C-alpha cells in the first residue's frame, strides 16, 4: 500500500474509532495540536507503562522523576536553547508559503508553486509564556522545549536522596512544546507533544561503551514492540544539535513523512551540567566515593517521541486483509486485550453469563464488551482497533463452561475452559 494513502487511512481510522481527534475541532481546529480519544489514551498509556517498567524495573540504577513544565527561564539560556534552538525559515516570494529550510531539496525554489524563495530567516522555536497577573510586572518564561532539562536540574537532588552511584540513569515521560515552523503529517510534528527520555550519567572514560550500550538497548526495545521490526533502522546525524557531539536516530523506515526519526540517541557529554554549573554558580561535579576522583559526569541521552512511536506503531500494524482492516498491534499495546461477546443479545441467560466473564476478565485485562450486530461484524470491529482476542459466550458456556476464543491474526478459534481462560490469555498476551 502507498504510504501517503496509508497516512490518510490511519488519520481516518483514528478519528472514526476514537484514537485521536483534531485539537479544538469545533472551533475549526488549531494547527499542531491533537487530543487523544478513549482508545488512543488506553493505547498511549499501555505504551508509556511498558516503557516505564522497562526503564525502571528491568534496569538497575535507573529512577524516574516528573519535573515541571515551566522552569526558571535561565535554564534555557544555560542549556543553549535561547541562542541555538532555531530553525531557518524560507518564505516563497510568490505564494508566501513558509518552509523549514533544512527540509527543502532546492533552497531557491518553492516546492508548492515554483516561485522564488527568499533568503532563510532564523526563528527561535521555544514557546514563550508570561507569568503573574499585573501588567508590566509579568515574568517571561518558556514552556519546556525539551523534557530532559529538569533531569539535569535535579541530578544532585536524586543523588542525595537515593543510594545511586555513577553510572546511573534518570528517566522521565513528559510534555514538550515547540513553535515548529512546518507542521503537518498528523502526530509526527506537533507544537505540543510527549517525550520519553533517559539521561545516563557516567564517567568520561566510559562514554563510548554506554553510548553503544544504549543505542542497542533502545533498538532492541523498539524491535520487541513493532509488528515488523525489519522496518526499524539507524541514521547517523552529520549536522548536530548544539548540545550533541554525536547523534543517531532510531528510524521507522516505512514512514510516510520525509523524516523517519522516532528517537534520538545523543552524546551530550558534559554540555548540560557544565552549562547549568556556570549559569547557576552551583558545583554540579561528582566525587567518586571510592576513589575520591572529582569530575563532571558525562551524559548519554535517549530521547524519543511518544506520539511518533504511537503513530509509527499504528502504521506498522495496519493491514487490509480482504474485507477486514486489522491493526496487528502487540497485545500489550492494543487498547483492549480482550473483547467479550454474548452469542445472542436476546437470551438473558447468555447475557448474564457473558457479563460474569467480562467482570472477571476486567480484573486482569483491558476488556471491551460488544453485543451489537452479528458475531462476524463484532470480530471485524475489534480487528480494526487491534483487539487480539475475542471471547464468545455461547450455549457451550452455559452447559459445559467452555468459551470460544478467536485470535485476531490467524482468525483461528479455540475452545477454552472458563476456569483456564485467564491463564490462557495471559500466556498469549505476555509474548
Ligand atoms: N532532549 C533531546 C531532544 O529533545 P529531539 O531530537 O529534538 O531531541 C526527541 O527530540 C524526540 O522527540 C524526536 O526523536 C521525536 O520523536 C520527538 N519530537 C521532536 N519534535 C517533535 C514534534 N514537533 N512533534 C512530535 N514529536 C517530536
Image: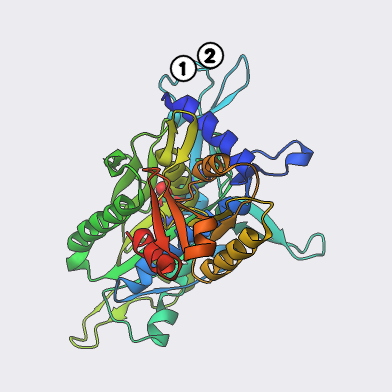
Query: Which residue position is annotated with label 1?
Result: 108
For residue 152, the mark is: none
Q: Position of residue 115 (x, y in %)?
A: 55, 12
How packed is label 1: few (under 14 Cα within 10 Å), some, or many (20 or more)?
A: some
In the image: residue 193, left or right of residue 229: right
| Of 252 and 320, the residue lying toward us | 320
Instruction: Look at the image and name its color scheme.
Output: rainbow
Q: How many numbered badges does the structure rendering display?
A: 2
Tell me the SS state at disc 1: loop
- In the displayed image of the protein, which residue is found farthest to the top? 114
In the image: residue 154, left or right of residue 28: left
Q: Position of residue 59 (x, y in %)?
A: 30, 71
- The vertical placement of 10 against 192, above or below, is above
Rendered-image quadrant of the C terminus: bottom left
Q: Position of residue 156 (x, y in %)?
A: 41, 79
The residue positioned 21% from the left and 81% from the top of the image is 293
Pick whichever of labels 2 and 1 is earlier in the sequence. 1
- In the displayed image of the protein, which residue is found farthest to the right? 134
Q: Are marks 2 and 1 in contact (CB under 8 Å)?
A: yes
Query: Which residue position is annotated with label 2?
Result: 116
| Of 140 and 405, the residue lying toward us | 405
Amino acid at each position: 500500500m502507498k504510504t501517503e494513502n496509508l497516512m490518510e487511512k490511519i488519520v481516518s481510522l483514528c478519528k472514526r474509532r476514537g484514537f485521536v481527534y483534531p485539537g479544538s475541532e469545533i472551533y475549526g481546529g488549531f494547527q499542531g495540536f491533537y487530543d487523544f480519544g478513549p482508545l488512543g489514551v488506553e493505547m498511549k498509556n499501555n505504551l508509556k507503562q511498558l516503557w516505564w517498567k522497562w526503564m525502571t524495573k528491568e534496569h538497575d540504577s535507573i529512577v524516574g522523576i516528573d519535573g515541571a513544565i515551566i522552569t526558571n527561564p535561565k535554564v534555557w539560556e544555560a542549556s543553549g536553547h535561547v541562542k541555538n534552538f532555531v530553525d531557518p525559515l524560507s518564505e516563497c516570494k510568490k505564494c508566501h508559503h513558509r518552509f523549514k529550510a533544512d527540509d527543502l531539496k532546492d533552497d531557491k525554489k518553492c516546492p508548492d508553486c515554483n516561485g522564488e524563495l527568499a533568503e532563510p530567516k532564523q526563528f527561535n522555536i521555544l514557546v514563550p509564556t508570561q507569568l503573574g497577573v499585573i501588567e508590566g510586572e509579568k515574568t517571561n518564561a518558556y514552556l519546556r522545549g525539551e523534557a530532559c532539562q529538569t533531569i539535569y536540574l535535579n541530578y544532585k537532588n536524586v543523588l542525595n536522596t537515593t543510594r545511586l552511584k555513577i553510572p546511573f540513569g534518570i528517566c522521565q515521560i513528559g510534555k514538550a512544546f515547540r513553535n515548529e515552523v512546518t507542521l503537518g503529517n498528523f502526530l509526527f510534528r506537533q507544537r505540543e507533544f510527549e517525550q520519553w527520555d533517559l539521561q545516563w550519567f557516567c564517567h568520561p572514560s566510559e562514554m563510548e561503551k554506554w553510548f553503544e550500550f544504549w543505542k542497542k538497548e533502545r533498538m532492541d526495545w523498539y524491535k520487541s514492540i513493532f509488528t515488523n521490526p525489519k522496518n526499524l533502522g539507524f541514521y547517523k546525524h552529520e549536522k548536530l544539535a548544539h548540545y550533541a557531539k554525536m547523534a543517531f536516530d532510531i528510524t521507522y523506515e516505512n514512514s510516510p513523512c520525509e523524516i523517519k526519526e522516532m528517537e534520538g540517541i545523543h552524546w551530550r557529554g558534559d554540555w548540560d551540567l557544565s552549562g547549568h554549573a556556570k549559569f547557576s554558580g552551583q558545583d554540579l561535579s561528582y566525587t567518586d566515593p571510592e576513589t575520591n576522583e572529582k569530575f563532571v559526569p558525562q551524559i548519554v541521552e535517549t530521547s524519543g517521541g511518544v506520539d511518533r512511536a504511537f503513530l509509527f506503531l499504528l502504521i506498522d500494524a495496519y493491514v487490509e486483509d480482504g474485507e477486514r482492516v486489522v491493526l496487528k498491534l502487540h497485545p500489550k499495546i492494543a487498547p483492549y486485550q480482550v473483547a467479550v461477546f454474548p452469542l445472542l443479545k436476546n437470551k438473558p441467560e447468555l447475557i448474564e453469563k457473558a457479563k460474569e466473564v467480562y467482570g472477571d476478565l476486567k480484573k486482569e485485562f483491558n476488556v471491551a464488551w460488544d453485543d451489537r450486530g452479528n458475531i462476524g461484524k463484532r470480530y471485524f470491529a475489534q480487528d480494526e482497533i487491534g483487539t487480539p482476542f475475542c471471547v464468545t459466550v455461547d450455549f457451550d458456556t452455559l452447559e459445559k463452561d467452555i468459551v470460544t476464543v478467536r485470535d485476531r491474526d490467524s482468525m483461528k478459534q479455540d475452545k477454552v475452559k472458563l476456569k483456564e481462560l485467564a491463564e490462557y490469555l495471559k500466556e498469549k498476551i505476555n509474548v
